[in-house]
Amino acid sequence: MPPADPRKDSQTARWGGKLRALRRREGLTQKELAVRLEISPSYLNLIENDRRPLTAKLLVRLSQTLDVDLSAFSEQEDAALVSDLMEVFSDPALEDDAISNVDVRELAQSAPAAARAVLSLYRHLDAARAQNQALATRLLGDAAPVATRATVPSEEVSDFLQEQRNHFAALEQAAEDLWHKADLDSDRLFETLKAHLADHLGVETVISRGPDQPLRHFDQKSHTLRLSEQLAPRSRHFQMAHQVALLEHKTLLDELAQSSAVISPESRALGKVALANYFAGAVLMPYEAFQKAAEDLRYDIELLGHRFRVSFEQVCHRLTNLSRPGQEGVPFHFIRVDVAGNISKRFSGSGIRFARFSGACPRWNVFSAFATPGRFRIQVSEMEDGQRFFCVARTVSNEARGYHAPHVVHAVGLGCDVSHAHKLVYADGLRLDDQDHIVPVGVTCRLCERNRCIQRAVPSLSAPLRVDENLRRSSFYASGS
């Protein structure tokens, strides 16, 4: 019998490539790294070529000698990279190249740096397509060809937040410091924030009148912060804390926004806004108090909103920040969509994959939430790999700003791995393993292999389109297999 091939150990294969990429990034030879790990260069060579395992003991030693975050070796990181690559290689332009799932996984495992370079190239290609589309539309009008969705600054910022796991310890600390330094009072938050802006930053806060005023405007010449009368008290508090971040923590925001995921100047500017929003959320919902309340109230979003005097969506955002070591909350994913299905915000702390370059699966409850405005939609979703998620969705609308102001409605979805569902009040009385109530979902139609889905919008890569004029199934793109 031939000897077992160690390359069949999936962790060995994955970690060998990662270790090699890490060593090269640090500018070390195999001999130099072997000395630090207290192993022989030949043994390190076997590890990097997937012929020996990278043991837990060596992982710990690696983290100590090179200050490496062990999360870089997590399966979740691999899954995210593979998922993104799968979506890239599902592009119709590559349809004839017959790139298999195995090919994509091998690329992600053996050459993660090259895999991320492919993603970066595709983002630039996607942006170039959109620029060509815009130019063609100007020149040709309705005759212009349709282009794919571009990589826009908001997408880069979403990648940045995902890269940081949507948790910024420095901003959490700054928010806690503000409570002590400004002697904030939850019952008098407007007054105490206003006093801090005036006494420590020389900023006068005034309420502007009239329907055409910006919701928030800071005049740098007069050092005046103007807040619209259309803002509800909770939104005024949020905007004041946001302005504190921009003025008092400008250097910190600039440093945090200098990420490899944030490329363009526009993205960095938008990233600073997102970070200032993070700070404002941390001020209104201090970490320790909020995390404890979330557990005590069993993640009841509405009750948390009442306790901390914030909006439904602000609570959902804050719930995705709870990953402080030793004080973690349930790892949630978050998504916000409009009635056209556009994803304007997304973050995956649960491990669920979101479509980045194409439309999302229409079977998610976040889309059906529009059919029952203001009501919760509960769903147990099952991905193709069998992983299940417990998902809660509800519509949210902008605050009333006058009779003639446009009424904007979004749907927000919050979810976690089904193993955490029992911690949420929304799972009470549900049989989470009841097959009749589990909804099969995918990342996007192009990648999903559930070929009989009646909501399929485009053919699957696994089942090329075959038109039979004498046969009509429940969906035009559904196959009989």
Image (cartoon, grey):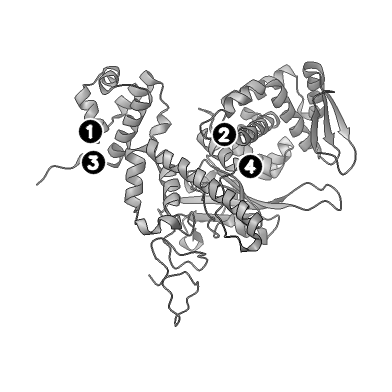
Dot 4 crowding, Cα within 10 Å, few <14, some 14–19, many 20+: many
Q: Position of residue 233 (x, y in %)?
A: 81, 36
Nearer to me, 458 or 92: 92
Dot placed on the residue nearer the N-terminal end, 1 or 3: 3
Q: Are marks 1 and 3 in contact (CB under 8 Å)?
A: no
Q: Which residue is at a point 82% across and 20% down the rendered structure image?
A: 198
Question: Label 2 vs label 3: CA separation?
Answer: 37 Å
Q: Amino acid at mark 2?
A: Leu
Instruction: Give the quarter of the figure containing the C terminus.
Output: bottom left
Q: Quadrant of residue 258?
A: top right
Q: Is residue 447 visible?
A: no
Task: Name the secondary structure under disc 3.
Answer: helix
Question: Label 4 vs label 1: CA separation?
Answer: 44 Å
Q: Which residue is mark 1?
A: 52
Labelled disc at residue 7: 3
Task: Name the secondary structure under disc 1.
Answer: loop
Labelled disc at residue 322: 2
Q: Which residue is mark 4?
A: 316
Q: Which residue is at a point 37% across and 23% down the rendered structure image?
A: 26
